[in-house]
């Protein structure tokens, strides 16, 4: 199979911005119609989920579209009903929530790394489809994405994270262990799909070996999942600013400014 040609950078940026404008329109529609939208992002480590989420939220209102990226459960949360720690993050009317990993942790990392018992895992496989059907019946629009990355591409991205200081924080001991257990994760993913790829909330697989393609494909699909109308307001005319008659502002020297870092760079350049 021939390797797919990567999209031109200029074309990618043009198409990405067009899709981001559609996301802004979708956001307005969600608010207007009081929709409740949940989007799950799951997949291998270094599959590119975070990059897609960043591009989705880049121009959106964080009060309407927010990201839920939960840390490891506390001791108290571990004693709760499994889905309990996720339900407080579900949207109210007029909101969209993007889960950067979700309740599917139990079917992936917890199963593979032995963080849950087999009984807990089996109960998850039984109850998860019912939980999601319940969400859908309540009026939530639930969209689930699985980001699929090849063994070779994941290895390349891991090596990149090791070499580049600004990316090294992305590599945790858990990530390295997951790399070693590639086959176990594949088995867990296949088992998860077999139980939770349901009619009411199917899985949508995003090929993510080429990050730019994955971003465009995922966002394009997302905006196609919810029919919406363009509610873009008419151009706004700014009112004239009132004059401050009789008001004298305090001297600028009374304020504390941050140092001018840029000027210091320019001085170094001219030396």
Image (tube, helix red, strand yellow):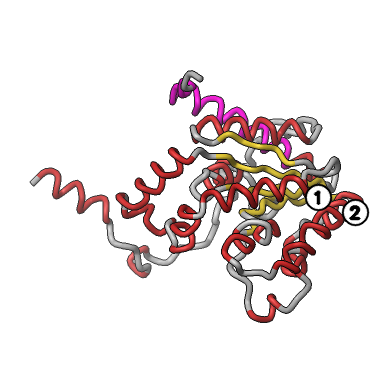
- Picture coordinates of residue 152, whole percent (x, y): 43, 38
Q: Is residue 203 above or below residue 185?
A: above
The residue carrying mark 1 is: 36
Please state which of residues 101 and 250 is positioned toward the viewer in this rendering.
Answer: 101
**Residue at x 51% of width, y 54% of height:** 181
- Eye-nearest disc, 2 or 1: 2
Tell me how far mark 2 sits from mark 1, CA to CA. 10 Å
Per the rendered image, the range of residues in magenta is 4-27
Closer to the chain start, of discs 2 and 1, is 1
Q: Residue at x 33, y 63 (%)?
A: 258
At label 1, counting other C-alpha atoms closer than 10 Å, the crowd grade (few under 14, some 14-19, many 20 or more) is many
The main secondary structure of the magenta stretch is helix
Say how many tags the image has: 2
Q: Does the magenta stretch include residue 7?
A: yes
Looking at the picture, tell me which residue is in the foreground, 89 or 200.
Answer: 200
Callouts 2 and 1 close, C-beta under 8 Å: yes
Question: Callout 2: helix, strand or loop?
Answer: loop
Q: Is residue 199 left or right of residue 75?
A: right
Instruction: Give the residue displayed 33% in from the left and 52% down from the top.
Output: 162
In the image, residue 62 sits, relative to residue 206, either above or below, namely below
Is residue 174 at all visible to an observer of this figure? yes
Which dot marks residue 138? 2
Q: Is residue 42 left or right of residue 50?
A: right
Q: Residue at x 52, y 44 (%)?
A: 47
Q: Find residue 112 and report its horizontal and vertical position in percent.
A: 59, 60
Looking at the image, can residue 61 be seen?
no
Residue 192, above or below 14: below
């Amino acid at each position: 199979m021939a390797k797919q040609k990567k999209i031109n950078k200029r074309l990618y940026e043009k198409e990405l911005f067009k899709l981001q404008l559609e996301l802004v329109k979708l956001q307005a529609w969600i608010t207007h119609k009081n929709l409740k939208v949940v989007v799950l992002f799951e997949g291998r480590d270094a599959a590119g989920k975070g990059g897609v989420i960043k591009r989705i939220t880049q121009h959106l209102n964080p009060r309407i579209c927010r990201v839920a990226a939960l840390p490891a459960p506390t001791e108290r949360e571990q004693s709760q009903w499994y889905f309990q720690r996720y339900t407080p993050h579900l949207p109210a009317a007029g909101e969209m929530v993007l889960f950067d990993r979700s309740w599917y942790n139990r079917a992936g990392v917890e199963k593979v790394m032995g963080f849950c018992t087999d009984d807990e895992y089996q109960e998850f496989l039984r109850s998860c489809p019912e939980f999601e059907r319940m969400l859908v019946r309540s009026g939530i629009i639930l969209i689930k994405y699985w980001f699929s990355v090849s063994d070779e591409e994941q290895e390349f991205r891991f090596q990149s994270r090791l070499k580049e200081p600004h990316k090294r924080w992305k590599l945790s001991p858990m990530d390295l262990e997951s790399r070693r257990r590639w086959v176990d994760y594949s088995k867990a993913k296949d088992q998860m799909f077999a139980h939770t790829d349901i009619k009411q909330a199917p899985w949508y697989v995003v090929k993510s070996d080429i990050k730019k393609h994955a971003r465009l494909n995922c966002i394009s699909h997302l905006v196609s999942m919810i029919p919406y109308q363009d509610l873009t307001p008419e151009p706004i005319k700014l009112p004239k600013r009132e004059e401050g008659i009789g008001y004298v502002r305090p001297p600028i020297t009374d304020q504390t400014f941050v140092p001018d870092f840029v000027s210091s760079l320019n001085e170094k350049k001219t030396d």
